[in-house]
Image (cartoon, rainbow, N blue to C red):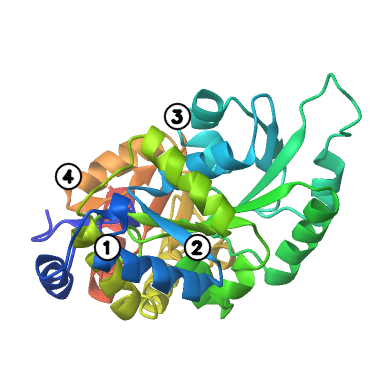
C-alpha cells in the first residue's frame, strides 16, 4: 500500500488548491439569477472574451450545459448527430430523450472525430416527413471515448461547413476544451467560431470543484437561462464557486501541458509491462486507455488489485482501463503507479 493514494480514476478527482480556496472564501457574492453576483458576472464576461461569443451562463455542470443546449436548439422528435463515443449518447442517463425528446444518430468517427463527408451522409432529407429532422450536430473536444483525441481545427471547419450549408445548428461539448487548446495550440475562440454554442468545464484538469459555462449568441443564452431555471440550475450566491473557476483560468490553464507529459510517461511505461497493450501515439492529452491481455485477468480485477496497493484506475470495458492524469498527480506519482501496475501484473 502506498503512503498516499494516487487517484488516476478521473481528472474530476482534483481538489481545490489553497490559493483557489482563498479566492472562494474572499469572493464577492450576490443573487446570480438577478445578475447581482459580481464574481459570476466577471466569469461570464471572461468566458465571452475567451471564446469570442456574445453571452454566457454559469451552470452547475457540463452535463446540464449539454442538456440545455439540446433543449434550446431542438424540438420534439428532432435528431442530434454525434460520434458513437459521444458523452451525450453514452453517459448522460438518456438525458437527450428524457429532457428534450430528441433522438441521437451516431457517426463512426476516427477516435471520436468525424468528417464533413460523414456528416453529409448522416444528414436527413428534410423533405421526408416520416424521418426525424436533422437539427443539431454535437462534437466533443477532446473526445473522451476517443482516447482524449483533439479535434483538428481544419476537420472541424469541414464539419461546420457541411452543417451550416444544411441549416443545422452546431454545438461543442467542451468538457476538456482547455486540454485541446493547450495540446494543439489552437485558440479557444477559433474552435468556438465553428459552433453556435459550446461550454467550458472547470472541474476536470482546471481543478475547480463545481461548474461549467455555456456560451453562444445573446438570443441563445436568453433561452438557456429559462432552461436553467426549468432544470433546477439556479444557484443564487454562486460567486463562491465562480471564484474558483476564475482562479483556475488564471493559474491552471497552461499547466495542463504537464498533465499531457505525465500521460505520455504513463503510456510509455504501460507499453513495457507484460500482459498489457496500449497504442501510445493515440494518447494525445491526459487520458490513457490500455487493454488487459493477460490470461485470466480482467480490467476489473486489475483495478481492484491496484486499488488495494494505493493506485486508483477505472475499468471502461471488460478488458479496457482508463487512467487520467491531472494536477493532483505528479511525475513521481506516475512512476510509483507504474511500479504498482507492473508488480500486480507480474504476480
* Labelled disc at residue 242: 1
> Residue beneath label 2, please?
55
- Residue 345, how many percent across, how many down? 33, 50
Compared with residue 244, is residue 303 higher up or lower down, i.e. above or below? Answer: above
Residue 239 drawn at (x, y percent): 22, 61
Name which residue lies at 57% across and 51% down. Answer: 220
Q: Is residue 145 left or right of residue 26?
A: right
What whole-number distance in Å separates the C-alpha atoms at marks 3 and 1?
A: 26 Å
Eye-nearest disc, 3 or 1: 1
**To which residue does mark 4 refer?**
308
Q: Nearer the viewer, mark 2 or mark 4?
A: 2
Query: Residue tagged by mark 3?
Result: 93
- Dot 3 or dot 1: first in sequence order is 3
Does residue 144 show up?
A: no
Considering depth in this image, is 144 or 211 the residue closer to the camera? 211
Q: Earlier in the sequence, mark 3 or mark 2?
A: 2
Q: Secondary structure at mark 1?
A: helix
| Alpha carbon separation for disc pair 1 and 2 | 16 Å
Residue 43: where, in percent of width, then height?
A: 35, 68
Q: Are marks 2 and 4 in contact (CB under 8 Å)?
A: no
Question: Whole-Å distance between the Cαs marked 3 and 2?
Answer: 28 Å
- Residue 29 showing in the rendered view: yes
Alpha carbon distance from label 4 to label 1: 36 Å
Label disc, if present, on residue 36 of the rendered structure: none
Is residue 152 or residue 306 the one in the foreground? 152
**What's the CA distance linking mark 4 and mark 3?**
30 Å
Residue for point 46% across, 35% down: 92
Amino acid at each position: 500500500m502506498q503512503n498516499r493514494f494516487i487517484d488516476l480514476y478521473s481528472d474530476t478527482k482534483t481538489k481545490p488548491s489553497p490559493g483557489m480556496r482563498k479566492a472562494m472564501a474572499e469572493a464577492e457574492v450576490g443573487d446570480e439569477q438577478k445578475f447581482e453576483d459580481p464574481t459570476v458576472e466577471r466569469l461570464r464576461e471572461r468566458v465571452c472574451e475567451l471564446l469570442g461569443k456574445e453571452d454566457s451562463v454559469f451552470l452547475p455542470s457540463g452535463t446540464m450545459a449539454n442538456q440545455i443546449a439540446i433543449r434550446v436548439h431542438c424540438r420534439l422528435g428532432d435528431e442530434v448527430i454525434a460520434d458513437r463515443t459521444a458523452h451525450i449518447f453514452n453517459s448522460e442517463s438518456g438525458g437527450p430523450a428524457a429532457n428534450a425528446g430528441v433522438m441521437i444518430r451516431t457517426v463512426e468517427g476516427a477516435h471520436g472525430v468525424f468528417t464533413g463527408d460523414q456528416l453529409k451522409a448522416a444528414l436527413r432529407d428534410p423533405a421526408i416527413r416520416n424521418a426525424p429532422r436533422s437539427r443539431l450536430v454535437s462534437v466533443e473536444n477532446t473526445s473522451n471515448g476517443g482516447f482524449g483525441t483533439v479535434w483538428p481545427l481544419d476537420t472541424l471547419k469541414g464539419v461546420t461547413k457541411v452543417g451550416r450549408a444544411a441549416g443545422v445548428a452546431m454545438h461543442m461539448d467542451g468538457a476538456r476544451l482547455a486540454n485541446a487548446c493547450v495540446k494543439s495550440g489552437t485558440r479557444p475562440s477559433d474552435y468556438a467560431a465553428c459552433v453556435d454554442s459550446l461550454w467550458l468545464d472547470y472541474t476536470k484538469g482546471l481543478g475547480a470543484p463545481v461548474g461549467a459555462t455555456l456560451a453562444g449568441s445573446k438570443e441563445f443564452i436568453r433561452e438557456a437561462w429559462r432552461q436553467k431555471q426549468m432544470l433546477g440550475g439556479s444557484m443564487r450566491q454562486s460567486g463562491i464557486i465562480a471564484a474558483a473557476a476564475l482562479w483556475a483560468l488564471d493559474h491552471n490553464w497552461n499547466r495542463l501541458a504537464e498533465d499531457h507529459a505525465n500521460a505520455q510517461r504513463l503510456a510509455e511505461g504501460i507499453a513495457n509491462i507484460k500482459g498489457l497493450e496500449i497504442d501510445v501515439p493515440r494518447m494525445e492529452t491526459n487520458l490513457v486507455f490500455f487493454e488487459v491481455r493477460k490470461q485470466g485477468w480482467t480490467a476489473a480485477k486489475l483495478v481492484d488489485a491496484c486499488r488495494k496497493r494505493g493506485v486508483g484506475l477505472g475499468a471502461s470495458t471488460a478488458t479496457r482501463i482508463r487512467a487520467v492524469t491531472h494536477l493532483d498527480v505528479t511525475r513521481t506519482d506516475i512512476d510509483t503507479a507504474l511500479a504498482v501496475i507492473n508488480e500486480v501484473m507480474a504476480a
